[in-house]
Image (cartoon, rainbow, N blue to C red):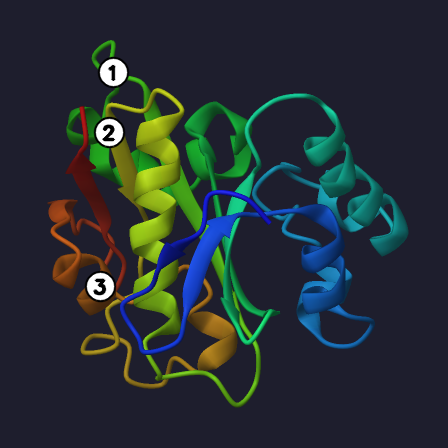
Amino acid sequence: MTGHSQGAAGGITTAAAEWPAVEELFGVRGEPSRCWCRFFALPGASFAATPPAHRKAQLKDKFDGGGPAPGVLAYHGGSALGWCAVEPRGCYPRILRSQVFKAAGPAAADDGERVWSVSCFVVAPGHRRSGVAAALLAAAVDHARANGATVVDGYPVDPAQRPKAGPSDLYQGTLGLFLSAGFEVVSDAVPGRAVVRLRVG
């Protein structure tokens, strides 16, 4: 593991993700082991048409391609307990075509900026609501900045407007999480969903 930093919660460290730890964290059961964080990378019917094994291979290719890691991990005691996906926004065609993004209009334009997007959080059961997501978001911002981003965007859910949203609906993070990290709302045109932005360069 390289590039470790101390997380916001006691005993948590963060680092640019490495494939073996991601593979172990996502496991063989549950939504992460089926999605492999490819939902926003595969637009339209492509996601449904791609078997989980192929999605896994596509994510692994991201680590083998020589570019920046496509996300960051949080560790405790040497074990990975959380993941946050963050990449240049162009890597996520489904975000670019989403209602939430389109409703933001000019507010979400890049205007020549190098925009990275935080698209997904995975926190291991038993470690939720313990500061892991906050540590991951801070690490994601640092990772994006270190790799040339000037702006980092997120697309969180506002539980105050969507009180029935469960854990499976909050994988893009909550509005409060991003606001606490210094992000500002640039669009809330879709009720209960926001586009938020942090300038980092």
From this view, report whether residue 24 is shown above or below residue 54: below
Quarter of the image where one finds residue 96:
top left
From this view, report whether residue 9 is shown above or below residue 42: below
Residue for point 84% across, 42% down:
57
Q: Give the structural element (helix, strand or loop) at label 3.
A: helix
Q: Which mark is residue 151?
A: 2
Which of the two discs, 3 and 2, labels the residue nearer the N terminus? 2
Q: Say few, some or many: other residues with alpha carbon within 10 Å of mark 1 (under 14 / 14 to 19 / 20 or more).
A: few
Which of the two discs, 1 and 2, labels the residue nearer the N terminus? 1
Q: Give the structural element (helix, strand or loop) at label 1.
A: loop
Q: Can you name the residue that lies furthest to the top here? A: 112
Give the residue pinned by disc 3. 175
Which of the two discs, 3 and 1, labels the residue nearer the N terminus? 1
Please indicate, yes or no, whether residue 193 appears anywhere in the rendered image.
yes
Using the numbered discs, state the Cα–Cα distance from disc 3 to disc 1 in whole angstroms: 23 Å
The residue nearer to you, when weighing 143 against 192, is 143
Q: Say few, some or many: other residues with alpha carbon within 10 Å of mark 2 (under 14 / 14 to 19 / 20 or more).
A: many
Using the numbered discs, state the Cα–Cα distance from disc 3 to disc 2 in whole angstroms: 17 Å
Give the residue pinned by disc 1. 113
What amino acid is found at the position of numbered circle 2 in the picture? Val
Using the numbered discs, state the Cα–Cα distance from disc 1 to disc 2 in whole angstroms: 7 Å
Image position of 78 (left or right of 62) = left
Q: Give the structural element (helix, strand or loop) at label 2.
A: strand
